[in-house]
Amino acid sequence: MPHTEKTILEVQDLSIAYPITIGVVRAVEGVSFTLDDGEALGLVGESGCGKSTLGLSILKLQRPPGQVTGGKIMYRGTDILSMSTRALLKLRGQSIAMIFQNPLTSLNPLFTVEHHFLETIHFHDPSLPREKALAAVGKMLETLGIEKKRLKEYPHQLSGGMRQRIMIGLALIMNPDIIIADEPTTSLDVIVEAGFTELLLSLRRIYKLSIILITHNLGLVAEIADRIAVMYAGRLMEVASTEEIFAHPLHPYTQGLIACVPNILVDQKELVTMPGSPPDLVEPPAGCPFAPRCPKVMPICRLKTPALLEHFPGHSAACWLYGKNVRETRTNPGEG
Amino acid sequence: MAILVSARDLVKEFPLRGTLFDVFSPQRKCVHAVDRVSFSIAEGEVLGLAGESGSGKSTTGRLLLRLVEPTSGAVEYRGRNVTSFSARELERLREKAQIVFQDPNSSLSPRMSVGQAITHPLQIHGIGTPAERKERVLDLMEKVGLSPAEFLYRKYPHQLSGGQSQRVVLARALVTRPDFLVADEPIAMADVSVRALILQLMRQLKQEMGLTYLFITHDLATAKYLCDRIAVMYLGRIVEIATRDALFSQAHHPYTKALLAAVPVPDPRARRDKNLPKGDIPSAIDPPSGCHFHPRCPYAVARCQEARPPLREIAPGHYSGCILD
């Protein structure tokens, strides 16, 4: 999607590699996407596809020895990758905040909920009086639906769902524009997960948030995201609106991914399966990384890597199946 | 069809470690993990046991194989009471009744090759000569999709993908040719595309080997694909049990309804109003009186707090534990 005035974050041709003893793991390869103000983008893929590395790198938090080997990450016109440490510390939390997968390991077991909040506030705004900070925390707890007495409790005294609500509260307390949520519900039970989804959707409206939701859970993105980017072996395979991705997936990987998920509303006699496993990212095969598993593979797929091209308005795919004639092969083009 | 396994009034309480004072007190606190659970599984059937964390579904699975000892109640396997089995009888039972755990990586010894791991149960039960064992293992490996078997036979767990590890665990459980398999969240740790493959494999193996499953899962969408009947557990009790079709089309218990509504659907057109139950699951140490679900239930009335609602047959083969039915 091209850069517009509404674009708040733009990732351009980003590559990230982890040099290890046996070679270089190409975790992210030439990834480009944009995030509009107020938009929720789902970054979908299986383990090891690079989605978490990509999410962390937006805050320049990728774990060593991970290195950005190319590309830019523009936040409101400034390249995050060339920011000073001081500017980065301000950016993290105040402009872009992150929610991690496992709240128990993200919260400090030695500190109360209140301490977590006050520490975050004072780090960003040391001059704010304690009373004012506490008032802000109280308001946040109300929004999260957590009783005030919980402030004095420690993480182990809270249920999993409550911990995850505290995590999202900590992420929002400095009023950032963008929330990056990395598998936020993986450790939660179904009903708690559904509650968290509702909370996230209402917070999104209250705080006018832009969201990047990183997940393998297609059900979750279907409920939260406006647009979906599908990742495989470090590359973006397809980007389109959520409705479009589910109704008319173009890439065979996206098609397989959607078809192999059990759907409670549908009677599935058989699930579609995708044999094989993702390629080794140390020495990825030439051509399209999905070619070895692709049911529609063609000779060219094994030779040249397809670029992510826009085949319909707002609907891009990196696949050799789609030439210029793609529009005629489909009867019902979506809005994109 | 003949009943293969049945549970009668199974109870499991785990006592809490307390202070010295607590040891002498007559009412020691405990976790009521499983609270008078009864069901039976027919030969060739797949019974799903669905519920959230802490509902007691995994403990129930382990009780069936006597991996944990019940506080009271009985488990019958082919009409014989497993709870009174001697150590030797129990060993013979384990040849016929097996279990697959959630995390394949922690279920496999990193120091045993694939071949050794799958052969191990045959050695324990003294089945076959070494040559026969190897042939049987290689055969089974091909059957569960560990192919080429000769090549993977010598591999170690760290050299396998997630899907392959789960296949090794399945093969190890099936190598003694059991007729009953407890599958405790076998796909919860697997990747999306691997899940579908394992589910399909489990269905295929069931037909080829004439297996009966207890399929423990928190994911009702998965249960819908694999199970013939489904029991829903909440805080140690079965609240509803019905055939798959009846459960998904005519769920009765408010908890089952909540659970069904909460499942995320991979279809943006299906965004639904979920009407979620309030609050969190209460502690299994001091569960609520009467119906365990009443504090969170949108339909609760005063009577719900009084006594445990019995499971009543509301339609042929469809039991629900709600007084409002």
Image (cartoon, coloured by chain):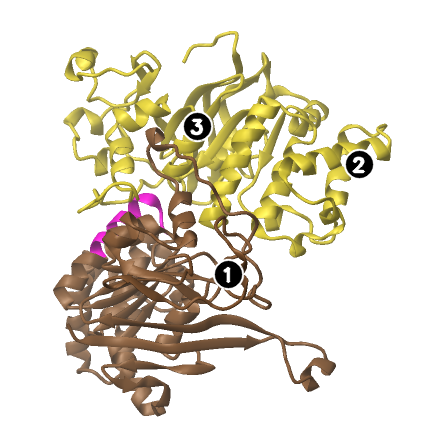
Chain colours: A yellow, B brown
Disc 3 to disc 2, C-alpha distance: 33 Å
Kindly indicate whether the residue at mark 2 contacts the one at mark 1 (C-beta within 8 angstroms).
no
**Magenta span has B163?**
no
Q: Position of residue A13 (x, y in %)?
A: 44, 20
Q: Position of residue A160 (x, y in %)?
A: 57, 51
In percent of width and height, residue B23 lies at 68, 84
Identify which residue, A224 or B274, lies in the foreground: B274
Q: Which SS class for mark 3? A: loop
Q: Nearer the viewer, residue A208 or A94?
A: A208
Q: Which residue is mark 1?
A: B304
Q: Do marks 3 and 2 both belong to one polypeptide chain?
A: yes
Closer to viewer: mark 3 or mark 1: 1
> Which residue sits at x=17%, y=35%?
A295
The one of A322 and B11 positioned closer to us in this rendering: B11
**Within-10-Å neighbours for mark 1: few <14, some 14–19, many 20+:** many
Q: Is residue B25 above or below residue B314?
A: below
The residue that disc 3 covers is: A225
Nearer to the camera, B298 or A219? B298
Callout 3 crowding tier (Cα within 10 Å): few <14, some 14–19, many ≥20: many
Q: Which residues are magenta?
A: B190-201
- Where residue A266 is drawn, which disc sits there? none
Which picture quadrant has residue B11?
Answer: bottom left
Amino acid type of disc 1? Cys
Give the image quarter of residue A285. top left
Judging by the rendered image, the residue that carries numbered circle 2 is A134
Q: What number of labels is visible?
A: 3
The amino acid type found where label 2 is placed reads Leu
Q: Nearer the viewer, mark 1 or mark 2?
A: 1
Looking at the image, which residue sits at the far top? A5
Dots 3, 2 in contact, CB < 8 A: no
**For residue B137, side relative to residue A135 (left or right):** left
Give the chain of mark 3. A
